[in-house]
Amino acid sequence: MSPSTPKRVHIIFTGGTIAMRTNAQGQLVPANSGDELIAAIPDLAQQFTLSTQQLCNVASAHLTSEIWLQLRQAIISACADNTISGVVVVQGTDTLEETAFFLDASLSNDALHNKPIVVTGAMRSADEEGGDGPSNLRNAILAVASSEARGRGAMVGMYGRLHAARHVRKLHTTRTDAFGSLEHEILGEIASINVSANASSNTTDLDTNHAVPQVRFHSPAQRLTPSIDLPDALYSTFQQGAIDLPRVDIVSTHISCDSLLIDTSIKNGAVAIVIQALGAGNVNPNISAAIERALTQGVAIIIASRSHLGEAEPIYGYVGGGQSLVKMGAVMSHDLPAHKARIYAQLLLAQTGATAQPIQTILDGFDRLR
Ligand code: DAS
């Protein structure tokens, strides 16, 4: 690409509040196409060559593993095009961190040709005055076009901040600054800097300062989650309706909970179960017994914590304590919350096709997260 050729960014739209408007009944529903969202940031269309793709237009609660695999395939194709700098994915914020983590964990730098992905959305609808959609979309495009974004895999870009897919969480239900990385540093930000118009032109007019957004990363490029390459055949088999990603359920625990949900999950074909355990990864004797039954039947058990900070660790040796569970053959999710541990387990099982040996596959795979 010659230095004068505008950078090309590919944008894949799937829907979300960013594309919703209020209907005659006063309800927010999917409405705007991706191209209509791009029309709201005309200056970016002058700065970059933008190609767009509308995969679907749904609330992010309606996304499925089938749409994820289509999205992943669309990203692989876009990144293989050497005119494209990177890919922006637009979706609803409710499951945004899940999609970002799925993409980050399932796409190696080789598959991406080192190109970055930024997943973004909005907390305010397209028809809301002063909505955050246009600025989030603008920032995401600027971020993937930055050469410093290369080699970082999939990130989340919201409210001017870039978060690692592994660490980011939606922490607030409605605020525009809803996303955070908890105790982890954010990867970077898009901040406005003031430049003098005369600094870049030879005019003799009076100086006029104007704000220019600039992408700044805080640390060198690295991948925080070991990539799990999915077999090429998976997508085509999936398209033929022959398989789904392996079934991995999440069971949440609390005072006085019993084993019903774990037993039901096994009966319904779960290959692995993520237990959202208490504190550092502890459960009561009912759940401990159910975990032992599951492991005996060959179902892998992953222990995550319902706490927001810290990691699931094998500390306690009482019945149901994390150390006792690990001795039985369960595995700790480390810093992954239950919903990301579920995705990671699905990918590991899909990669090896080792649904016959899920326990070993999960043990080995989660060990690499440390
Ligand atoms: N919560 C909405 C959003 O922020 C809806 C969704 O996730 O699709 O986009």
Image (tube, helix red, strand yellow):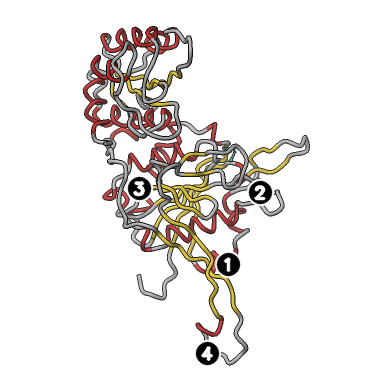
Crowdedness near tag 2: few (<14), some (14–19) or many (≥20) residues, C-alpha within 10 Å: many
Q: Quadrant of the C terminus?
A: top left
Q: Nearer the viewer, mark 3 or mark 4?
A: 4
Label 1 sits on residue:
43
| Foreground of the two, 107 or 240 | 107
Spatial separation of the CA atoms under disc 3 and disc 2: 29 Å
Residue 62: horizontal and vertical position, in percent? 54, 31
Type of amino acid at the residue the image marks with label 3: Ile
Dot 4 lies on which element?
Answer: loop
Residue 338: horizontal and vertical position, in percent? 41, 28
Q: Which residue appears at 38% of the width and 75% of the height?
A: 3
Say whether residue 168 is left or right of residue 147.
right
**Which disc, if any, is residue 126?**
2
Residue 307 visible in the displayed image = yes
Q: Which residue appears at 49% of the width and 55% of the height?
A: 140
Q: Are marks 4 and 2 in contact (CB under 8 Å)?
A: no
Crowdedness near tag 3: few (<14), some (14–19) or many (≥20) residues, C-alpha within 10 Å: some
User: Sequence order check: which comes first, mark 3 or mark 1?
Assistant: 1
Q: Are marks 3 and 1 in contact (CB under 8 Å)?
A: no
Spatial separation of the CA atoms under disc 3 and disc 1: 28 Å
Q: Are marks 3 and 4 in contact (CB under 8 Å)?
A: no
User: Sequence order check: which comes first, mark 1 or mark 4?
Assistant: 1
Label 3 sits on residue:
76
Label 4 sits on residue:
202
Spatial separation of the CA atoms under disc 4 and disc 2: 39 Å
